[in-house]
Image: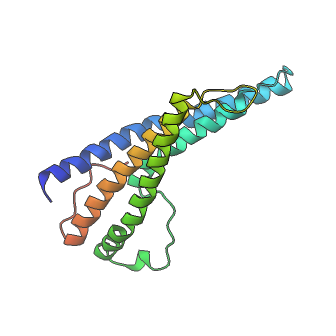
Amino acid sequence: MPPSLVRYVRLVDGLNRTVGRFVVWMIFVFLLLLLYASFSRTVLNVPLAWSVEMAQFLLAAYFLLGGGWSLQADAHVRMDLLYSRWSARRRAFADSLTAFCLFFYLAVMLVGGLSSTHYALAYDQRNYSAWAPPLAPIKIVMVVGLVLIFLQATALFIRDLARWRGTPLAQDGGP
């Protein structure tokens, strides 16, 4: 593989590993928020109008920002009827072919996300609720997450092509 592609794979792997290690801590923020909302509602008798929506926003950010790291760690769901029995080269070839479906899906999601983010910024879009938070921040986070997943999918495609050709790229320690 050309050195520029190897550098790209290492850069994207490092970026998603760093973001993923930061995002993994967001689950504790999520849990603390829900615990506080439950305490506030049951003990203080003061329900929080914003807690459920904020929890949804945090979970969406957690899911999308951690998606690249999850893809890198091969922690996604896979239908494994024959795949595990195949050789590494055959799996790499199959992954290279199916990567185009992933690229198409991510491209459609990214175009929709950019359009939706543009609309949210241009018209100060707010959620239809009592709290009525602006939607632009979470939409921006979603687009960033989709870009990170797309970059990681591209890096995995390059890695799979190298493995298929019989010259696998070395791992940098993995997630």
84 sits left or right of 50 in the view: left
Left or right position of 68 against 63:
left
| Residue 94 x, y percent position in the rendering | 36, 73
Q: Nearer the viewer, residue 107 or 123?
A: 123
- Image location of residue 170, percent across then percent down: 22, 56
The residue located at (46%, 54%) in the rendering is 108
Residue 73 in percent (x, y) is at: 41, 54
> Horizontal placement of 171 versus 68: left or right?
left
Q: Which image quarter holds the N terminus?
A: bottom left
Q: Residue furthest left?
A: 2
How many discs appear? Answer: 0
Residue shown at 18% from the left, 66% from the top: 167
* Occupied quadrant, residue 60: top right
* Location of residue 17 in the rendering, given as x and y in whole percent from the top left corner: 37, 43
- Please tell me whether residue 163 is drawn above or below residue 72 in the rendered image: below
Quadrant position of residue 159: bottom left
Q: Is residue 25 visible?
A: no
- In this rendering, is residue 120 above or below 14? above
Depth order, front residue of 167/117:
117
The answer to whether any part of residue 39 appears in the image is yes
The image's colour scheme reads: rainbow
Name the residue at 59% across, 33% down.
28
Q: Residue, x 51% and y 29% (percent of image)? A: 121
